[in-house]
Amino acid sequence: MRYRRAQTAGATYFFTVNLANRRSDLLVQHIDELREVTRIVKRTHPFVIEAIVVLPEHLHAIWKLPEGDADYPMRWSLIKSSFSRGLEKTESIRASRVKKRERGIWQRRYWEHQIRDECDFEKHVDYIHYNPVKHGYAKRPIDWPFSTLHRKRTPQPHSQNCFSLNQSPI
């Protein structure tokens, strides 16, 4: 089955990618492996990670694809399959997944949203960085170690027409 997805070359996209077992902690337990497979995919199929947060059972990311390239599904497929191959097989695998040669670690689908403008970008970056607090993993966004919030960046003030997810427009 083919899903309807945005296919704009060179665009910026927000993603939510989940493990099949939403009570798992595989992503943070194997964060180094996830980082390494992502680096390998980035070398062979370049993209820029504008923001990311990795939680125990899901992650959110914003990627900027190169001009002329809209193939983020292939990149996610490579990251998910490479990560899965690097793990010991301990999960139970349903027959439908065995038939498709899947491990059953990741949910098959993921959420994608094409970023529309700077305001949309800012809101999604805020959402990403606040997510560990929302899920109870940290008291403050800065306390969560698996986030691009720790990158050295020049703080950008929100434009007067944009409001942070934690900020009321009134």
Image (cartoon, rainbow, N blue to C red):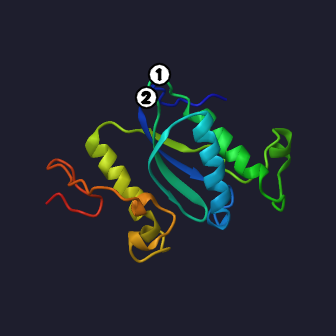
Percent across and percent down for residue 166 are 28, 64
**Under tag 2, what secondary structure?**
loop
* Quadrant assignment for the N terminus: top right
**Residue drawn at 66 percent across, 67 percent down:** 29
Using the rendered image of the protein, determine whether residue 122 is visible from the camera's viewpoint. Answer: yes
- Residue 29 numbered mark, or none: none
Is 13 displayed left or right of 28 in the figure? left
- Residue 68 numbered mark, or none: 1
The residue to which callout 2 is attached is: 10
Q: Looking at this view, is 111 or 71 the one in front?
A: 71
| Among the 4 quarters of the image, the one containing residue 102 | top right
Identify the mark nearer the N-term, 2 or 1. Answer: 2
Which amino acid, mark 2? Gly
Do residues under tags 2 and 1 come within 8 Å of each other at their CB atoms? yes
Is 85 displayed left or right of 71 in the figure? right
Percent across and percent down for residue 140 are 38, 74
* Quadrant assignment for the C terminus: bottom left
Which amino acid, mark 1? Gly
Is 123 displayed left or right of 76 in the figure? left
**What is the CA distance from the residue labelled 2 to the residue labelled 1?**
6 Å
Percent across and percent down for residue 7 are 48, 26
**Residue drawn at 81 percent across, 38 percent down:** 100
Q: Looking at this view, is 108 or 149 the one in front?
A: 149
Mark 2 Cα shell of 10 Å, populated few (<14), some (14-19), many (≥20): some
